[in-house]
Image (cartoon, grey):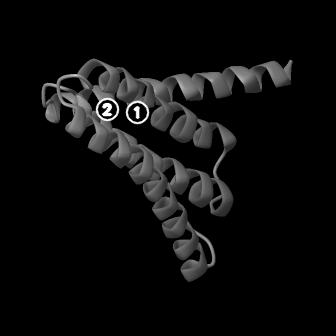
Amino acid sequence: MQNTIWRWRDAAAVFSGGCLGGAARYGVGLWFHDGTNLLGTTAVNLTGSFLLALITYGLALYVDLPDWLILALGTGFVGAFTTFSTLFVNVVAHAASQPAFVAVMLVVNLVGGLAAAMLGYWVATAWAERYNKW
C-alpha cells in the first residue's frame, strides 16, 4: 500500500511541475513570438538543457532533497518547459520559406543545447567543489 502512495505522490509531483513548466513555456512563446516560433523554442530549449543538467547533477547529487521534488523540477517542470518536438515541427513548417534561418536555429538548438547542458553540469560541479555541498 505504501509503495502505491509513493507512486501517486511522485506522479502528482511530475504533474504539478509539468503544469508550471507548460505555463512558463506558453509565456515565453508569447514573449518571443517571431512568426516562426523558432526563437521562443530556442530560448526554452537552451534554458531547459541548462536547468535539467543543473537539477540532475546539482540538486539530485549534492543537495538532500526528496525524490518527489527532483521529479517535479526535472521531469515535470523542465520536461514540459522544453519543446524539442515543437522545434522539429517548426523546422519542417518553415524549411521551404526560410531555409537559412531554419538551418541556423536547428544547429543552435542541437549544439547549443548540448553546450547549455555541459554548462549546467559545470556550474553544479563548481558549486559543489567550492562549498563541498550545496
Q: Position of residue 34 (x, y in %)?
A: 13, 31
Residue 71: name its quadrant.
Answer: top right
What x and y, as percent, mark residue 85? 44, 25
Label 2 close to label 1 by CB (< 8 Å): yes
In front: 88, or 3?
88
Identify the residue under disc 2. Answer: 24
Question: Is residue 123 placed above or below 40 in the rendered structure?
Answer: below
Instruction: Pick whichever, 12 or 99, lies toward us.
Output: 99
Estimate how packed mark 2 is, as few (under 14), some (14 to 19) or many (20 or more) residues with alpha carbons within 10 Å: some
Please, what is the three-letter code of the amino acid marked with disc 2? Answer: Ala
Q: Position of residue 101 (x, y in %)?
A: 21, 38
| SS at badge 1 | helix
In the image, residue 127 sits, relative to residue 92, either above or below, namely below
Query: In the rendering, at what x and y percent does residue 11 appear?
Result: 64, 22
Q: Which of these two is toward me, 82 or 133? A: 82
For label 1, count other residues whose C-alpha is less than 10 Å away and answer few (under 14), some (14-19) or many (20+): many
Give me the residue at 31% from left, 32% from top: 24
Left/right of residue 97 with respect to residue 43 in the rendered view: left
Residue 109 versus residue 16: which sits nearer the camera? 109
In the current view of this chain or complex, which residue is farthest to the bottom?
A: 130
Camera-nearest label, 2 or 1: 1
Taking the image as shown, residue 33 lies to the left or right of residue 21, namely left
- Marks 2 and 1, how far apart in space? 7 Å
* Residue occupying image coordinates x 30% and y 24%: 90
Q: Which residue is tagged 1? A: 81
